[in-house]
Amino acid sequence: MSDAVVVALITALGALLTAVIVETIRRERAQKATDRTLQTLVGQVTPNSGSSMHDAVTTIGKTLEQVRETQGQHGERLAAVEAHVEHLRS
């Protein structure tokens, strides 16, 4: 093999190795960004004493149940008032 061929092979291998290293670094950075995003999402869907979306949804659900109960009580009271008004009209 001539010196020119050896130099060309070494240059090509060097370029290939550089490309592999650069791609590896790029993928590692992308993976770290993905890991940070996943950690944020996990933090939002895991109960943590009030500040996660999970906790907010749970609180909303409890509040909604209280509103339903109150509306049910109001409906019963309204029906009683309407019945009393009908009784007074007759």
Image: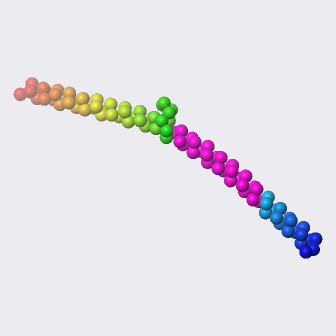
User: Which residue is rendered at x = 93% and y = 71% of the image?
Assistant: 3
Q: Residue 65, image x and y in percent? A: 33, 34
Q: Is residue 31 magenta?
A: yes
Can you tell which quarter of the image residue 64 is in? top left
Can you tell which quarter of the image residue 74 is in? top left
- Nearer to me, 89 or 69: 69
In which quadrant is the N terminus drawn?
bottom right
Q: Residue 5, image x and y in percent? A: 89, 72
- Nearer to me, 73 or 9: 9
Q: Residue 69, image x and y in percent? A: 28, 31
52 lies above or below 21:
above
Q: Is residue 50 left or right of residue 25?
A: left
Colour theme = rainbow
Q: Is residue 45 magenta?
A: no
Q: Is residue 13 left or right of residue 1?
A: left
Q: What is the magenta segment's predominant secondary structure?
A: helix
Q: Residue 62, image x and y in percent? A: 37, 33
Residue range of the region highlighted in magenta in the rendering: 19-44
User: Which residue is rendered at x = 17% and y = 26% of the image?
Assistant: 81
User: Which residue is rendered at x = 57% and y = 42% of the image?
Assistant: 39
Looking at the image, which residue sits at the far left? 90
